Amino acid sequence: MAESKHADLEAWETALRAAVLSAGAKVLEQLLQGIGSGREPRAIICKCGARMESQGLKHKEVLTILGPVTYWRSMFQCPACQSTRYPGDEEFDIMETTRSPGLRRMMARAGSRSTFKEGRDDLKIYAGIEVSAKDIERVAEGIGQQMDAWVSQERKEILQDHGLLRPEKTIPILYISYDGTGVPMTQEELTGRKGKQVDGSAKTREAKLGCVFTQTTTDGRGFPVRDPDSTSFVGAIESAEDFGWRIYGEAARRGLSKAERVVVLADSAQWIKNLAQMHFPEATIIIDLYHARQHVSELCKTLFVRNEKKIRQQRIRWWTDLDDGKVEKIIRQTQQLLPQDAEAKKKAETEIHYLEKNTEYMRYAEFRAQGLFVGSGVVEAGCKTLIGQRLKQSGMEWSVRGANAIISLRCILTSGRFEDYWESRAL
């Protein structure tokens, strides 16, 4: 009875887990013996074309999810160029790494979810695995780069032969939405770039994020319903031209050719409309309602300076007109209220011009009557969660290479394609 009062269940759990993992590592070590060693059934040929020669057995310690294990495998060396190969490493997918595939998968996931230090701590607590934060960083970014290469190759094959993808059934509505958000960068990545700082310098570079999702039905009130688990993401810090092919490739993968209707839903940035017109010329373009409302709000502030009551009243009226798709009515009324002050007048005319050139993309009453979404909340939420929560934490600075690796990793995870990638490695 006295002993039970001093029992430490957590200590017992921890000790037993360590013992079980250690025993499992020994079993795994025994399973590895003999694989990747001995006479090869076929000649080992070097990339240069020469036949490689056996140099005997070399041992290697591999850190696995069970702990460290050691195995011996044959080493082959090319007599012509001196390069080496380890067929056993190739078979186990541990070439040029001392981390097992299972552990790398865990490290990549941990590094994508939180800071590398937090990922290190989580692995120790959850799995009893001790690695450094730098190890998490290297593996997560390495896997992210490999995932981006995998997606790029997949996109290349799709664009070369659209027949590779034949959806079983048509898609009623396919939505394509994309936006940009700043990511804090190291000074080396910002050299010579213009930005919004007082001195004209930049602290960030724009990461472009796109998503594709589908809609099959509306609810009882006629509001659109996004199909469950239908959203996939792509993104990178890259030029608008390169991103255009990235988002087009994802749309093609998701069944663009079988969509009965395609909708591009985004804000009114020129690069966004340019890509829509280039890659999705048959699409219905809808400017996000909430961005349009922001422009109307700015117009009210310019026309009714310091009259807060008038600003609120007119904003409600014009927002109602905007919801009804009566953009021309707003334009007519604002033109009759242009201020005398030259600077204020110019600012108001800029906002009016915005409404004029985007009128056809703001027929919100018509779009709603057709059961379509009119807000780009999906991609905006993606910018905040997929990119912002991981890459824009206090004190963070990224290289383009590192940021793109983590963006790719998080896009794959969020899109539900993490297991697809690992299965592709096993083929």
Image: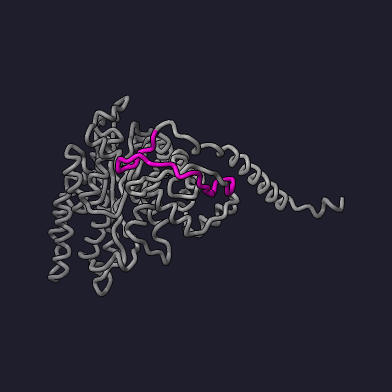
Q: How many marks?
A: 0
Q: Position of residue 8 (x, y in %)?
A: 75, 53
Residue drawn 26% across and 59% down?
Answer: 297
Seen in the image, is 32 located left or right of residue 112?
right
Seen in the image, is 291 located left or right of residue 392?
left
State the residue in front, 422 or 97: 97
Please provide the residue range marked out in magenta.
Answer: 43-69
> From the image, which quarter does the C terminus lie in?
top left
Residue drawn 39% across and 49% down?
Answer: 144
Q: Position of residue 140 (x, y in %)?
A: 43, 52
State the residue in front, 154 or 269: 154
Q: Quadrant of residue 27?
A: top right
Q: Position of residue 150 (x, y in %)?
A: 34, 42
Q: Quadrant of residue 183?
A: bottom left
State the residue in front, 44 or 11: 44
Q: Is residue 229 visible?
A: no
Q: 37 above or below 169? A: below
Q: Is residue 25 visible?
A: yes
